[in-house]
Amino acid sequence: MPMFALADANSFYVSCETLFQPGLRRKPVVVLSNNDGCVIARNAAAKKYVAMGQPWFQIRHASFPEKIYAFSSNYALYHSMSQRLMSGLEEMAPRVEQYSIDEMFLDLTGINNCIHFEDFGRQLRAHILQNTGLTIGVGCGPSKTLAKSAQWASKEWPQFGGVLALTPDNPRRTEKLLSLQPVEEIWGVGRRIAKRLNVLGIKTALELAHTHPAFIRKNFSVVLERTVRELNGEACIPLDEMPAAKQQIVCSRSFGQRVTEYNEMREAICHYAERAAEKLRAERQYCRHVSVFIRTSPFTPGAIHYGNVAGEKLTLATQDTRDIIALAMRLLDRIWLDGHRYMKAGILLDDFTPSGVTQLSLFSEEQPRNDSSALMAVLDGINQSRLGQVWFAGRGINPQWKMKRKMLSPAWTTRWSDIPVAMVR
DNA sequence: TCTGGGGTCCTAGGACCC
DNA sequence: TCTGGGGTCCTAGGACCC
């Protein structure tokens, strides 16, 4: 019988911030999305005042019984803390799957020959706390979905001390927990599906578990059918140790202020194209398809919302920034309309192949650039060295539209000049 | 004034083939 | 009355995740 654990950090982004400003730990703290747009993480103290996804401008001027501390997202810090967290977890289990920036599935099959699952969970917690300063929750179950449910419960009820195991030898306990879990809290059930299930009278995880899989498959999908089976302890979703190569790369951003000039938009698209090409090379892939999209804000009252996307296939697969910028510029020209106040734009690369020269068309005039890989290697080498930066002129210098990050914390763990100093008297 | 970014998988339907 | 059947490939859109 397989056994999975899910380990996940408590309010990860906020914890990363308060780790270096411990005085804020018990105060309400939130982390904001890019451009300081809306709330994407809250600690326990902030949960009673602020909803997930709530726009910051609504909160900033509202009055609360306590001051709410806000940080712009600092992904350099979160990534570096994530790496420490993940290597700490890897040390404790032979087979693991990193599921998100702060979550890891661990294969615990057979481990109960030596130690109880919950004792193991407590060891895991202590190990991570000591090595990173982060507090994690641990849920165990015979399927990934049940491990997720256990982890949800470990946070919902503090008396579990952040560790909870659902095991086949105690089915009553699993039933009890599932009867208390609303369907929208199940892993794989989002708002839409939850609504439809509620209409059918299925409100709790236990009620979903007791619904016939064939009925679910017919009326919903094979995905939800799998969830039903997983809730019944049947492991349908295996541990994925080697995540497959990416199938698409997206670079998109909302602007710090609206873009109305064509030249500004060109700079932005050029910048995103550069970033996307860099990511593509880091993945050691070549792409054969590029799309560009631009859109206005759907929230502006009165204004007509405009959004459009254009895509095109490349004759030759490429990972050369010059090819991707050139095509992106042509695509932008197809969808650009004067007179709109654009809020967001982006580029998407897909249709990947692991090597550049696939099959040269007999009649194609186009030939691959022979200096490409050497030049790109030099570009990436300089930019990764952190000693200097080079970029394509089309991106411009210090543009108006760049991201707002007014409340950014220092790069505590990734920049020498920002390393915290301990004062000893 | 002000509302995130980056992914995955599945399905339905159209185009096209013989 | 009744207007084929079966297959593949591609794309757009919808659902989900953090």
Image (cartoon, coloured by chain):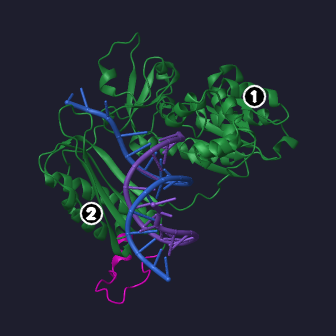
Chain colours: A green, B blue, C purple
Residue drawn at point x = 50 percent, y = 22 percent: A25
Q: Badge 1 is on which residue?
A: A175
The residue at 26%/56% (across/down) is A269
Q: Nearer the viewer, mark 1 or mark 2?
A: 1
Residue for badge 2: A328
Q: Is residue A109 left or right of residue A217?
A: right
**Measured from the top left, where is residue A273 in percent x and y?**
31, 60
> Magenta region, mostly helix, strand or loop?
loop
Whether residue A207 is situated above or below residue A278 in the rendered picture:
above
Please tell me in which quadrant of the rendered image residue A316 appears. bottom left
* Mark 1 → mark 2, Cα distance in angstroms: 54 Å
Secondary structure at badge 2 equals: helix
Q: Give amino acid for label 1.
A: Glu
Please indicate whether residue A156 sits to the left or right of residue B14 in the image. right
Range of residues picked out in magenta:
A355-377
Whether residue A372 is visible here, answered yes or no, is yes
- Mark 2: amino acid: Ala
